[in-house]
Amino acid sequence: MSKEEIRKYAQDLGMDVVGFASLDDYQSRKSPDPRTILPKAKSIIVLGHRMIDGALDSKNPRVNMVGRMTVMDTSKSHLYLTARYVERKFRVRTSPVLSSYPLDMEAPTLGLIGDLSLRHAAVAAGLGVFGRHNLVIHPRFGSRVSFTGLLTELPLVSDSPVREELCDNCGLCVEACPGRALEMEGRTDEMKCLRASQPFGIGSAFGYIRRFLGKSPDEQLALLKEPRFMSLYQASFIGFQYACFNCIAVCPLGDMCPG
Ligand code: B12
Ligand code: SF4
Ligand code: SF4
């Protein structure tokens, strides 16, 4: 009963996919134990929003990023509202996990492991299966879905898993990856992905700072006028800023607006 009430609440808010996983079915070897986040956690509610086709497929990298930002902002409010709804209605605690950051940026995880693996949670909640691009493919929306999660103290049973093998191994995602980060099956080379997809990420910032230090005041002024500094400045308040969405964009699975 509580599952259907929560599903209806979340769908009425505008969420495209909602799934439930008992903690017993969530297995993510590298991720922390969810009970370190919520000691009496028993289940995970996984919420998903369909991405915007015209943003994802645009040749304009800023518009690609706007698509990501809109989905992240919307999912943030929806996650808050759903967390409050569950806490109020069922008198249990919930711990929300956003779609991307904040992340533990310190060693050994270095921002590469989330507090909850939303892909493993989505699979356990019957929302899809892993594809060759190591993203979760939803039966209707393909990989054009962004997830958030809610750990809860509610004892919920998992939704039925997706049993079909949705990915047909066509290899388009592997070929389209500019960083060659998907060459090895079952593993994304994070550093290769980061170098290609975040041109103004932390690696670029380190390189810039290294060049900046030890320069004369005039040379430093010239460096501050470089377009690269302006882009780094913008990334510093936007957050992790992606310039590549190819592995999602080229995958032909899922329904899409005709284009
Ligand atoms: C850190 C992070 C990254 C890092 C590191 C990625 C990584 N190796 O996990 C970097 C910066 C490289 C990255 C890149 C991207 N990310 Co990212 N990322 C995350 C984040 C915040 C944490 C991931 C995590 O904890 N990983 C550590 C552990 C869990 O990974 P792992 O056990 O090593 O599993 C890896 C492999 O073993 C493999 N795998 C594991 N089990 C299985 C099982 C099978 C059968 C197979 C085939 C593979 C497989 O998949 C993983 C990829 O390497 C999540 C959000 C979240 N909290 O989950 C988003 C998330 C995974 N990212 C997402 C996306 C969309 C992207 C990008 C497309 C960026 C973009 N432009 O938007 C790329 C795609 C890269 C790719 N094809 O793998 C989405 C995926 C949505 C979906 N439908 O699956 C998530 C869930 C965020 C969201 N908003 O929904 N990401
Ligand atoms: S986001 Fe881009 S660089 Fe990263 S794995 Fe996907 S296609 Fe490759
Ligand atoms: S592009 Fe092809 S190989 Fe890659 S995930 Fe989609 S169906 Fe699988």
Image (cartoon, rainbow, N blue to C red):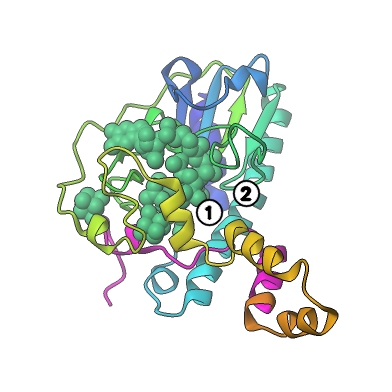
- What residue is at 23 percent from the left and 60 percent from the top? 175
Quadrant location of the C terminus? bottom left
In the displayed orientation, state which residue is furthest to the right: 217
In the depicted structure, whether residue 38 falls above or below residue 230: above
Label disc, if present, on residue 164 of the rendered structure = none
In this image, 136 relative to 71: left or right? left
Please name whichever residue, 13 or 127, is drawn nearer the observer in this view of the structure: 127
Q: Amino acid at mark 2?
A: His
Please name whichever residue, 16 or 171, is drawn nearer the observer in this view of the structure: 171
Residue located beneath label 1 in the image = 14
In this image, 158 relative to 87: left or right? left
The question of residue 128 being in magenta is answered with no
Label disc, if present, on residue 78 of the rendered structure = 2
- What residue is at 69 percent from the left and 78 percent from the top? 230
Q: Residues within 10 Å of mark 1 (few under 14, many from 20)?
A: some
Does label 2 or label 1 sit earlier along the sequence? 1
In the depicted structure, whether residue 230 falls above or below residue 9: below
- What residue is at 37 percent from the left and 72 percent from the top? 57
Distance from the alpha carbon under mark 2 to that under mark 1: 8 Å
Pointers 2 and 1 in contact (CB under 8 A)? yes
Which element type, helix, strand or loop, lies under badge 2? helix
Please name whichever residue, 61 or 88, is drawn nearer the observer in this view of the structure: 61
**Quarter residue 154 falls in:** top right
